[in-house]
Image (spheres, helix red, strand yellow):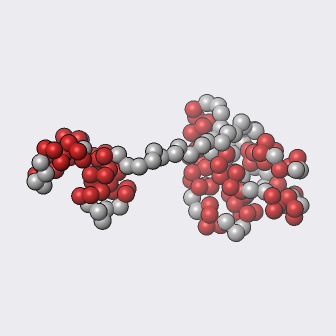
Amino acid sequence: MSDKLTIRSEMRAFDMKDREFYDSLSDEERKKFSTFLMLKYGGNVEGSYDLQAWYLRAHNERVNMNFFDIGKQPKLQWLTCTTVSPELGPQNHYWLNVVKKKEGLSKVHNFLSKLYPAMKKSDIELMAKLNTLADLKEMAKQLGWDAKQIKAEL
């Protein structure tokens, strides 16, 4: 692999606002270059709270927004990435793993899904956050559920 195509050298070019970096790659290197890695690494840096906040906000505003809309234009994606750095030199970027959701739904989510089968998952989650368990038990009671059913469902 080319020295240009290590995450360290790519992130250095990212931080140094090297707008010629993509043009300097050979055709073979361009095939291997992944702007998606810039998306994953770019907003995460070690350092002060202010520096981390800057990178995260700038990355969300400039790169995350509509990144895949320009997916067929990797040079434009690269140029967008070069706008993030506050020009403080190379930073130590890191990969942030995606938090995996727990398998299955909680009893509260299942209960609400049964009551509102047409409701979107995001609305079910919001409703679960807004209502206490006591609220939901009272709702079930008002719907005519007996104590045994309520205990089994909630």
Percent from the top left, x then y, of residue 111?
A: 27, 51
Q: How many marks?
A: 0
Left or right: where does residue 94 sit relative to residue 114? right
- Quick one: 108 or 65, which is closer to the camera? 108
Q: Is residue 55 visible?
A: no
Q: Is residue 27 above or below residue 102?
A: below
> Taking the image as drawn, is residue 52 in sight?
yes
Q: For residue 115, what is the image quadrant?
A: bottom left
Q: Residue furthest top?
A: 48
Front-lying residue, 82 or 5: 5
Residue found at x 13% / y 44%: 147
What is the residue that sits farthest to the bottom in this orientation? Answer: 72
> Could you say which quadrant of the image residue 85 lies in?
top right
Image point (30%, 57%), residue name: 113
Q: Position of residue 74 (x, y in %)?
A: 73, 63
Q: Residue at x 59, y 55 (%)?
A: 64
Quadrant the C terminus occupies: top left
Q: Quadrant of residue 45?
A: top right
Residue at the image position 29 percent from the left and 63 percent from the top: 117
Q: Position of residue 42 (x, y in %)?
A: 67, 46
Relative depth, front residue between 18 and 75: 75
Counting from the top left corner in percent of width and height, residue 143 is at 12, 55
